[in-house]
Image (spheres, rainbow, N blue to C red):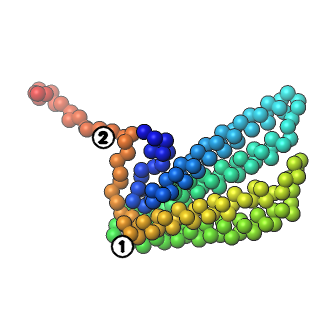
Amino acid sequence: MQIVDKLVLKRQRHLKWRAFDRLELALMVLCGVLLFAFSSTVVFDIVTRTIGHPWLWLQEVTQTFFIYAIFIGAAVATRRNDHLYLTAVSEALHGTPRLVAEIVIRLVVFGVASCLVWFGYLNFLRGFSSFRMPSMTPIASLYAAIPIAGALIALFTIEQMVNGWRHGFDHPPERDDEFVAITPIKPVTPGEDRS
């Protein structure tokens, strides 16, 4: 089994284009690397402070890894339908009401993504006038994550709306390979023959 098959969810496959599977895989790997790097820099920061020789720049690096992990993770979660998605409302409906609810929910998500792109870009531009200490790096390096994540969220939302409109949102849940169906055992009453 390839790594793509392990990391890219099969759930709600009818809402996804295969062309974006590699992008989802790359973003999942990036999130893992960012999470590992964030955790490692926190440990290094603690160790260097404990031994009395703090590396002040580690806090900047930790902050960068944390912020990028959050925003890239939000984009991946949107593709996987694990984030920014109101399942309880839409899954209780069927037919046209379900289609309308799913489209409205995704239009709201698209609106939020558009705000992330626009206002995140404006913040990014303003970020060149403020600097992080002690490295004197423009704070725009942090703000860049916001419009990037917004663009990815918008892309994945459009993907789901187009495929949902074409194929419908109301599909039976797909069977995951890791789950095995369990057959209930019929209880035996005293005196009953089990054969």
- For label 1, the SS is helix
Name the residue rendered at 52%, 71% in the picture: 107
How many other residues sit within 10 Å of disc 2, few (<14), some (14-19) or many (≥20)?
Answer: few
Quarter of the image for residue 140 reads: bottom right
Amino acid type of disc 1? Thr
Of the 4 image quadrants, the one containing the C terminus is top left
Amino acid type shown at disc 2: Ala
Between residues 165 and 92, which one lies in front from this camera angle? 165
The quadrant of the image that shows the N terminus is top left
Nearer to the camera, 141 or 89: 141
The first of marks 1 and 2 along the sequence is 1
Residue drawn at the location 35% of the way across and 51% of the way down: 174
Distance of mark 1 from mark 2, alpha carbons? 31 Å
Quick check: can you spot residue 93? no
Q: Are marks 1 and 2 in contact (CB under 8 Å)?
A: no
Residue 92 sits in quarter: bottom left
Q: Would you name the residue on which mark 1 appears?
A: 96
Horizontal and vertical percent for residue 136? Answer: 88, 52
At x 18%, y 30%, the residue is 188
**On the image, numbered disc 2 is attached to which residue?**
181
Q: Is residue 111 above or below residue 186?
A: below
73 sits to left or right of 10: right
Q: Is residue 159 visible?
A: yes
Q: Secondary structure at mark 2?
A: loop
- Disc on res. 66: none
Q: Residues within 10 Å of mark 1 (few under 14, many from 20)?
A: few
Residue found at x 25% / y 38%: 184
Q: Position of residue 13 (x, y in %)?
A: 41, 56
User: Percent x, y for residue 122?
Assistant: 75, 69
Q: Where is residue 143? Give x, y as percent.
A: 74, 59
